[in-house]
Amino acid sequence: MTPARHDRFRALFEPRGIIVAGASSHPGKFGFVAAHNVLAHGYAGPVFLTNREGGTILDQTAYRSVDELPDGAAELVFVCTPPATIPDLLRACARKGVKAAFVSSAGFGEAGEEGKRAERDLADLCAGLGLLLAGPNGQGIISTPVSLCAQIIAPYPPAGRIAVASQSGGFVQAFLNYARSTGVGVSRAVSAGNSAATTVADYLEYFADDPATAVSLIYVEGLGDGRTFFDEARAAAAKKPIVVLKGGVTAGGQRAAASHTGALASDDQVFEGMCRQAGLSRAHTVEEAFEIAASFAVHPLPRGPRVFVLTTAGGWGVITADRVSQSRDLELLALPADLRAAFDERLPPRWSRNNPADLAGSETRDTVVECLELAVRHAEVDAVVLLGVGIQSNLADLERRGRFYPGHGLERIVEYHERQDTRYATAAVELARRYGKPILVATELADAQPTNPGIVKLKELGSLAHPSSHQAVTALEHLYRYRRYRDRRGL
Amino acid sequence: MPATRTLSEHASKRRLAAAGIPVVAERLCATAEEAVRAAAELGFPVAVKLCGEAIAHKTERGLVRLSVGDEHAVHTAARELLALARPEDGEVALLVARMVRGKRELIAGCAVDPTFGRCVMLGIGGIFAEVLADVVFRLVPISRVDAEEMLDELEHRAWLGSFRGEPAVERERLADVLVALSGVVEQDASIRSIDVNPLIVADGLPVAVDALVEVEG
């Protein structure tokens, strides 16, 4: 990316000053929503509203025209005006020093032949003016490092390190909502709209060098020139992980090759191969896509495939061991003798003495944390799945709600249980950081009891509670595959 | 899209052999007598096929005789096949090839994807190919690492291990085939597709037993 192009992307995500063009005083209009969201979420730079009638919008005087604005005060224009007005508007913006335009207005390529022509003209105009064009027909931009919420959808997500680019505004919204519910936050998000000039792959290129971003999460349907997408995505994936969700996998485009081998192919299999070759982590559902991206954002990459499962809940351990054993990428580590001996020293003989290590209720105050550290620091362990966090606090919650509380010694035990889960969560995060290995906490309580002190602590420490061990193992597979992709290619 | 034509089976295999892809030992013969001599040289049993640029569906037309065991049988098969030639087949010849023994058949090739362009593919072949639809793709050009990863991504990759008394497939040799296929289409823009079917695993080594190269013009 040339410095000039990089500067235009910077103006899109970290603008020094914003114009909301077509701002409205009517709360039902997008021009109001956009102005409201930009003004209401802490963006610190100057915000200029324009409306052809002028007037006061959200306690602020609206300009009748961009020409009335001070020169060089805004770098981004968020456009909500009708298509016919946009060319003159953008010319005026360019004269004022604007470098990037987000066009939310509809009525372009999605609206027939005339719209397609208008869209091409718009792209050409912006290229001529030196403006980065995002959209049209997009739903907005989020950039948490500068508290920018320039969008006509919700929510405003917590700050974090996931960058989102999507051909569907609805999935931007979905990913932002997952960010809110899991607490694993977002750096940037952009609804690419019709991608008239700036494609999802272009955003990937910017995110790859964006210090605020650790992982990119994209939704794509059509790719246009697939080879260019491949080249750009592969170059970006060499720098940072990319999670991709693809829509329209069964549409079945016409295959040119008439040969037998060609006839066996489906577009989806080619897309799958392309992802593997480019180092992209392909998800198959919306929730999986977010969870994988969140995992890249919070967990270190495992150095190898060997997984150790530590549990205080027997069945979860068994089912997780099954899942790991069935994985094509991961291995259930055969319990090393020295690790077994170290566990034996700390636990009564009823523990499982195997991997999964089921402590079987034999844990005392410190054993879970001690055993977790023994496992994670062991040279043969590449990753740990920790099950059972939150169980004690769940019971504590039941006791607290019962009619015997307070009294009967319940306060003390409730407090003990809750403290224990907090300790487990803290240990999972701290030990993962200390040893540079992923420890994935999986529990249904992530969804069922988000107020559980174990879950709350994980979030507080910037980690993630996986809502099921299957999903945790799926995420771990992607982390390991990405690591392996890099290692095999000397990246 | 420009018009395409298919090279004959023999010419197709020579293209692949020139790129280092192992192909079955075979001779192109004009007469039944030549076919008999070629078979004796190659060693029995042999396969005898009618070959020509205009012949694409040999099996459907009964133009393939497998496991032909001796000189007399080769002579008979050769005469029958020559008699089956149709005027529209143009110039034809007999293709005599050593029978390749292996329980596992793969398919490999190159095709043009409408979105991503040229691809290399590897799949499980044989009579269950369509049902299993176990195929893996990469975009041209592929690296050695890409090729090796393709083997691992076959759903039935265990099938590449030792199988019913046959040794495991030599992974490096199979990866060589994929890298070579990628190289062939990378260097020759006129190639539209390559179909190697079957690529038989014999004593752990992949051998192209039948192949068709489709070219523009």
Image (tube, coloured by chain):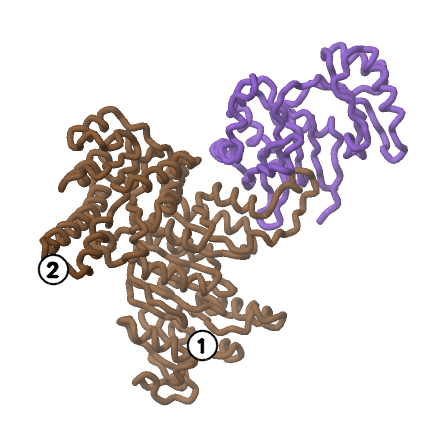
Identify the residue position indicated by label 1 in the image: A80
Q: Where in the figure is residue A214, as x and y percent of width and height?
A: 33, 51
Q: Please, what is the three-letter code of the amino acid marked with disc 1? A: Cys
- The answer for how far apart the CA atoms under marks 1 and 2 are is 58 Å
Chain drawn purple in the picture: B
Identify the image quadrant of residue A151: bottom left
Disc 2 crowd, CA 10 A, few/some/many (<14, 14-19, 20+): some
The answer to whether marks 1 and 2 sit on the same chain is yes
Q: Where in the figure is residue A268, as x and y percent of width and height?
A: 56, 47
Which numbered marker is on residue A406? 2
Look at the numbered disc 2 and give the secondary structure of its residue: loop
Q: Given the image, what chain letter belongs to the residue carrying mark 2?
A: A
Chain A, hue in figure? brown
Answer yes or no: is residue A239 visible: no
Answer yes or no: is residue A226 visible: yes
In the rendered image, the vertical position of residue A35 relative to residue A127, given as above or below: below
Q: Give the residue drawn at x 26%, y 45%.
A: A388
In the rendered image, the vertical position of residue A214 relative to residue B134, given as above or below: below
Q: Is residue A413 left or right of residue A108?
A: left
From the image, which quarter does the C terminus of chain A lie in? top left
From the image, which quarter does the N terminus of chain A lie in? bottom left
